[in-house]
Image (spheres, rainbow, N blue to C red):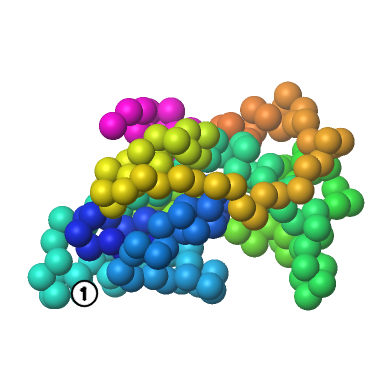
């Protein structure tokens, strides 16, 4: 999470949405940074609303808009599958190099007990316990230039977002069968609704 007070925004870093690239582009301009550890770097919106916004209000800081990116949920899931195909030495148990994306996706939506499936769905990051969207500004990961323009306006300087921490390519075994594709899209219906209908298309 990165906060810029005069710019009136808090950037919430959802996993696998280019958040490292955004952080690298704006961190030197921000006043508050929660980074370098996954438990605070990827602060979900409900934690911001519960813990950070009340502190800001007590400090006389109002009108902060939360901002994040949302990747198409099927692509988000595939990115996790690719990312964990080359795990660090200390986390070999999350290795996905020996399984297809089809298997990975089925196990994910079935809630299988697998070490490599330990990630929360995007809805849990974006929404409250009732499933209502509580992030003020949601940008598509696929339209990074639009987010860069938004940040440039809020920070009063040109912001360029370069790509970092890209998941490895896996050309083979990445296509979903039609049956699994349908199950995954049904599972991600709340995320798809936000991605299609609640994301910013222009400034």
Q: Residue at x 80, y 58 (%)?
A: 86
Q: Is residue 17 magenta?
A: no
Q: Residue at x 49, y 46 (%)?
A: 161
* Residue range of the region highlighted in magenta in the rendering: 190-203
Q: Nearer the viewer, residue 196 or 37?
A: 37
Question: Could you tell whether 66 is left or right of 82 in the image?
Answer: left
Q: Is residue 194 magenta?
A: yes
For disc 1, the marked residue is 55
Which quarter of the rendering shows the N terminus? bottom left
Residue most toward the right? Answer: 98
Question: Could you tell whether 140 is left or right of 184 in the image?
Answer: left
Which quarter of the rendering shows the C terminus? top left
Q: Residue at x 39, y 70 (%)?
A: 33
Few, some or many residues within 10 Å of mark 1 (<14, 14–19, 20+): few
How far from the left and from the top, in percent, is residue 70?
47, 42
Up-down: is 173 above or below 126?
above
How far from the left and from the top, in percent, is residue 98?
89, 51
How far from the left and from the top, in percent, is residue 186?
56, 32
Up-down: is 43 above or below 9?
below
Q: Residue at x 28, y 52 (%)?
A: 155
Q: Nearer the viewer, residue 148 or 86?
A: 148
Quarter of the rendering containing residue 50? bottom left
Q: Is residue 14 visible?
A: no
């Amino acid at each position: 999470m990165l906060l810029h007070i005069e710019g009136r925004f808090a950037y919430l870093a959802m996993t696998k949405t280019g958040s490292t690239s955004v952080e690298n582009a704006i961190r030197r301009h921000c006043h508050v940074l929660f980074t370098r550890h996954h438990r605070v770097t990827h602060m979900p919106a409900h934690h911001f609303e519960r813990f950070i916004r009340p502190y800001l209000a007590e400090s006389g800081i109002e009108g902060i808009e939360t901002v994040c990116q949302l990747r198409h949920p099927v692509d988000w899931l595939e990115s996790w599958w690719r990312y964990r195909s080359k795990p660090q030495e200390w986390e070999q148990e999350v290795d996905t190099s020996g399984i297809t994306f089809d298997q990975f996706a089925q196990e994910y939506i079935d809630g299988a007990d697998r070490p490599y499936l330990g990630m929360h769905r995007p809805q849990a990051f974006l929404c409250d316990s009732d499933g209502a969207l509580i992030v003020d500004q949601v940008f598509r990961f696929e339209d990074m230039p639009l987010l860069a323009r938004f940040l440039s306006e809020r920070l009063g300087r040109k912001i360029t977002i370069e790509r970092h921490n890209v998941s490895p390519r896996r050309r083979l075994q990445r296509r979903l069968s039609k049956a699994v594709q349908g199950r995954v899209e049904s599972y991600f219906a709340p995320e798809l609704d936000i991605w299609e209908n609640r994301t910013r298309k222009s400034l």
